[in-house]
Every structure is written in structure tokens, then in C-alpha cells.
Image (cartoon, rainbow, N blue to C red):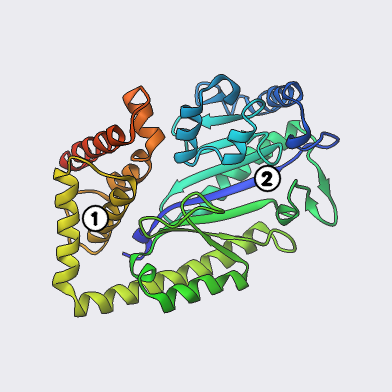
Amino acid sequence: MAEGLIMTSRVRLARNLKRIMFPHKLSSEQGKKLVSEVEEAFYSDVFREGDYSTLKLWQTDKLSQTSYFEKRLISNNMINNSSKGAVILSNDDSESIMINEEDHIRIQCIKTGYNLEDAFRSANRIDDQLEKNLDFAFDEKYGYLTACPTNVGTGMRASVMIHLPFIATDNKVEESLYALSKLGMAIRGIYGEGSKVTGSIYQISNQITLGMTEQETLANLKAVINKIIIHETRAREVAYKNYKYEIEDRAARSLGILKSAVLLTSSECLKLLSDVRLGIEMGIIKTVSIGTVDALIMDVQPATIQKQVGKNLTKEEINLARAKLVKRKIRNKGR
């Protein structure tokens, strides 16, 4: 059960080119020129255009951009820089290169489950390809130079998205969770800085990028994550011992609502999906896969639903379409 708590592992590397102003200072034309330079440096015999494609934000509409954000493929900064921003995406969306976000280049690799080392290897592989062809801003003393001083050094942010329903309802444990910031870790919602925690899903990442290697950063983060998993697992064991039928009822009722609801708001849907995921993790629900639940958590977001339908919808129409989508996926068991 322990590793099943972790939905995804992500590694992001920030890089900038020498003698070029940071993105917020670049004109649209200068930014578009930089996009072409990064494309030329990236596409090769190893990274073929058939396996990756470039999405130029200035050629997309606002709804599409918001949907990419909901899927964690781009950031709000990218949307704000849409007149000169682009992202190179792998066909399965697990690897991406954001161009002209806060930094010139942000390499991002996301892996399913507890796979930080795999995510780092993928990001490092892309980094090596780009560094062969681009002149990165690097200082012998400080490391990679970035737009925000908090990223100087390795330029690496490693994170996991983790499901913590019992820690989320235990105020004392939650306080100790946030106290981990003193250990150089950040605890946020699904979409990182400034986002709310929904569906008991937390994003936990390193904050320190200066003065330690990438391997040390990953080791420190894993040590913290492992402690959190122990806290959550123990809390579940105690709760299940004392409230077995209540927990089973909560999971079963949530699954029943998802199978039959006509309207589902975003917040209600995420809460119900969280309860169902808990039921799967604890062996209570066996008819739905964790993969189905995790995919739905991304697919039920407002802009993504409208993209699937192919048109702009009212709030009620979104809630109706969300319920239909969930019903179809859950009833098909998502296997």
C-alpha cells in the first residue's frame, strides 16, 4: 500500500542561455527565435520529431492553454508568456521542455508512482542533448543561473504527488507536515505554488537547489517522503481498526455516487475520487483501478472537459459532462 500513495514523481530542470535576457524581458519576436534555437538543439537522431512535437502557444486558444495547465504540462507563467512561449512534448506527455517560461528552458519529466530516479534520468538525458548544442549560463561557484535566485545551483526541483487522506484530517500530523518546510521541503497543492490542496492530494518538493548535488537532493526528498508514508500508513491502520465499517461505507458510497450522479462539481468529484482511491489502496474496492482514478483527477478539470466536448460550456453543462465522463470511465472499470 505504501508506494500506492504516490501518484506521480516529477523532476524539473531550469536552464538559461548565456548573453540572452530572461524571458520576461524578451520581445515576442526574440522569444520565438529562441524557440527555434531550442528546437534545433533538441531534435536529433535520439529525439525524433515523430516521438515529440512542438506546441507553440501563440497558435493555440485560451481554452487549450488552460487544459494543458490542468494536465500539468505547462504553468501559469507559460500562459502569461503565450505570445513567445512553446512546449516540446513527448507523445505520452511524460516528458516536456517549456520554452520561455520563467527561465528560457524548463525540462520536466513525470513518471507514474514512486520513481524519482527514473524521472531524473529522463530529464538528465534531455539536458545532456540540449547542453551539447546550447551555451547554458553556468557559474563555477554558483552553478546554473536562473531567473529566480531560489533555483540557482542545480536548477532542479524534484517532487511527488501523494494521496494523504488521513494526514489531511489529522490537524496535529498536518502541522508536522508543514513543519517539514524547515527541512528545505515545500508542501503545496496539485498545481504547485499558490494552489489549494484538493482531494487530499499534496505536492511535496525540495526547496534548496544550491550547495548540494542532484543525488543528495533526491535522497533528502525520499527520506522525507518515506517518513510521511509511515505517518499516513499508521494513521490508516489505527483508523481502520477503530472505524472499519465507516471507512468501507465511505468508499462504497463515494463509488456509488460517481456511478450514478447526474451533476458533479469539481470539488465534489475530487473528494469522491479521493475516497474511491483510498478504498482501492486499502483493498476495499477491487473493481476500479488506481490508474483510472488518477487519470480522472486530471480529466475532470473544467477546461479539459470542454476540450473533450469540443466547445465552451456553461458551469452546469460542465458539471453534467463531468458526471457523464466519470460514470462512463468508472462503469467500464478503467482496466
Q: Are marks 2 and 1 in contact (CB under 8 Å)?
A: no
Along the horizontal axis of the image, is 117 left or right of 295? right
Q: Which mark is residue 14?
A: 2
Callout 1: SS: helix
Q: In percent of the image, x 37 and y 61: which residue is there?
A: 3
Whether residue 268 is visible, yes or no, is yes
Residue kind at label 2, given as amino acid type:
Ala
Residue kind at label 1, given as amino acid type:
Val
Q: In this view, does 272 lie above or below 283?
A: above
* Quarter residue 82 falls in: top right
Spot occupied by residue 35 in the image (x, y as percentages of width and height): 68, 26
Spot occupied by residue 315 in the image (x, y as percentages of width and height): 33, 36
Q: In percent of the image, x 49 and y 72: which residue is there?
A: 177
Q: Which mark is residue 276?
A: 1
Whether residue 287 is visible, yes or no, is no
Q: Which of marks 2 and 1 is nearer the N terminus?
A: 2
Spot occupied by residue 167 in the image (x, y as percentages of width and height): 38, 70
Along the horizontal axis of the image, is 26 left or right of 321? right
Q: In percent of the image, x 48 and y 75: which residue is there?
A: 175
Label count reads 2
Camera-nearest label, 2 or 1: 1
* Quarter residue 92 falls in: top left
Mark 1 neighbour class, 10 Å CA radius: few under 14, some 14 to 19, many 20 or more: many
Along the horizontal axis of the image, is 312 left or right of 195? left
Callout 2: SS: strand
Q: Dividing the image into 4 quarters, which one contains the N terminus?
A: bottom left
Q: Residue 247 carries which label?
A: none
Q: Which of 76 and 241 is in front in this view?
A: 76
